[in-house]
Image (spheres, helix red, strand yellow):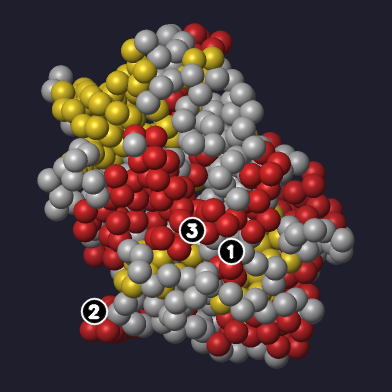
Amino acid sequence: MGTKTADYVIAGGGSAGCVLASRLSENPNCSVILLEAGGPGDGFLVKMPSGSYKLLGKPTADWMYMTEPDPSLNGRRVMWTAGKMLGGGSSINGMMYIRGSRADYDSWEKDLGCTGWGWNNVQTYFKRSEGFDGAPSQSHSTEGPLGVALPRKVHPLSHAFVDACADLGMRKVDDYCAGDVDGAFIAYVTQRNGQRSSAALAFLQPAMKRPNLTVITGALVDKVLIENGQATGVQYVKDGIVHQVAARREVIISASTMASPAILLRSGIGPAEELRKMGIAVQVDSPEVGKNLQEHASVQTSVSVDIPTVNMTMGPLHLAKGVIQYLLAGRGIMSMTPVEGMAFLRSEPGLAEPDIKLQFGAFSFDPATRKPYHKPGIVVYTNVAKPRSRGEIRLRSADPADAPVIDHRLLGDPQDMAALVRGLKAVDDILHAPSFAKHMTGRIAPAERPRDDAEWEARIRNTSGIGYHPVGTCRMGGDDRSVVDPRLRVRGVKGLRVADGSIMPIMPSANTNAPAIMVGEKAADLIREDAA
């Protein structure tokens, strides 16, 4: 086994991991090693926004985790996508840039003891990352490495969707990055000049020329090495050979909501009885490692329309023209994103905050074949903004090559189901509001409006997919049972932190890539402060 040494060893090169490697290596006196199980994340299909359609579901680019049978989905198993390359999810996602609401983060701080994670604090880190292509303002920065922009061409039906929401009394939100998502808006995307701006391309690639940063791809992290309660390094497997890397200062786990708790568990940090059953020596009895798993069910509503949509441009000639437009100008269908319009609504009056998130895309797929629909169509994805349903991550075995067990009840809480039923009814109302109804020519999915709540519920259980935003399995909190404290230090082990979506105690009202990048930015500051 070869042994390398660095001040900081980062296990996982996803969104937060890339940020950490970049920020920590800004100090030329600190050495950093970043370990990533996947590849470099810099190919043509990664950089071209629409390339994600070719990467999702490919074992070289996607972990393709399969859940256990989910009783709340009538026993269905669901594939959970996760980016298997530098940049992680930011290299294959839909590029939506949204931070969440002020109330999300203020609640983390006030209600959950996450000191320093209130909105005013985290907004500093959102802005630090951002390279906004519009005018700078109180809520936007043009100086950061992460490209943030409006889509280069917004489909007219995306505007019609926002207008239809307004028809029903919802607000048009001027700047949802200011902590106010209560209403409808056209969403920003993580692009620069029409190219995807992943965490790998934005943060890591410019930093890789530094002599104090070493990036090792194809490195599957097994466990953290711990001696006398101190993290001393990481063990990983590359090309079938076991290696170790030593950390002089800290180990940071940044491997995703699914993989980070698995690394902790293999390291002996987790529920003691479960670890013993796996033959793993217990370092810290931490019962909540892998628990608190959150993901929101996603239900599609699709209708046909009278304006051409993206699904009508999937033929060879259209795609060839699109590639040429993209190569010449970074424009055209290859620079488009799957979602342009967004809305947050209250599924019943009296709620303090919106509880339903809607995402609008100007394309449609045949619900039976999953191929592009033969007529112009649109889709609206409906999610519970902050789901109450919970699940857990467990080890299948102590072998790092074995994918962890994802045991979730996507619709396990009846309040989530009730909110989704109300939310889907609201979507139907929006699509029949004057600003959108004039474009609607028929229904695709569902083919007919369900007649009662029982039919709505049956449709939800039979068709729900995931929102692609799992969080929570290494919960941060001010209480002793939390996996990490508000400085992201793993309780019970010195020199060990977790920094990625797994630390989020409750899902923010957002797609989670921008929040994960924020976590990386804040973690870098915490680490530098503690080293001073």
Dot 2: element: helix
**Crowd class of label 1 (few under 14; some 14 to 19; many from 20; radius 10 Å):** some
Amino acid carrying mark 2 in the image: Leu
What's the distance in space between the residues labelled 1 and 3, CA to CA?
A: 42 Å
Amino acid carrying mark 3 in the image: Thr
Depth order, front residue of 210/379: 210
**Would residue 36 be visible to someone looking at this image?**
yes
Tell me where residue 531 appears, x and y as whole percent: 34, 34
In this picture, is 479 found above or below 419? Answer: above
Tell me where residue 91 appears, x and y as whole percent: 35, 57
Depth order, front residue of 141/344: 141
Dot 3: element: helix
Which picture quadrant has residue 336?
bottom left
Q: Return the residue at label 2.
A: 327
Quarter of the image that includes the N terminus: top left
Q: Is 121 positioned to the left or the right of 134 in the image?
A: right
Q: Is 319 positioned to the left or the right of 383 in the image?
A: left
Q: Which mark is residue 124?
A: 3
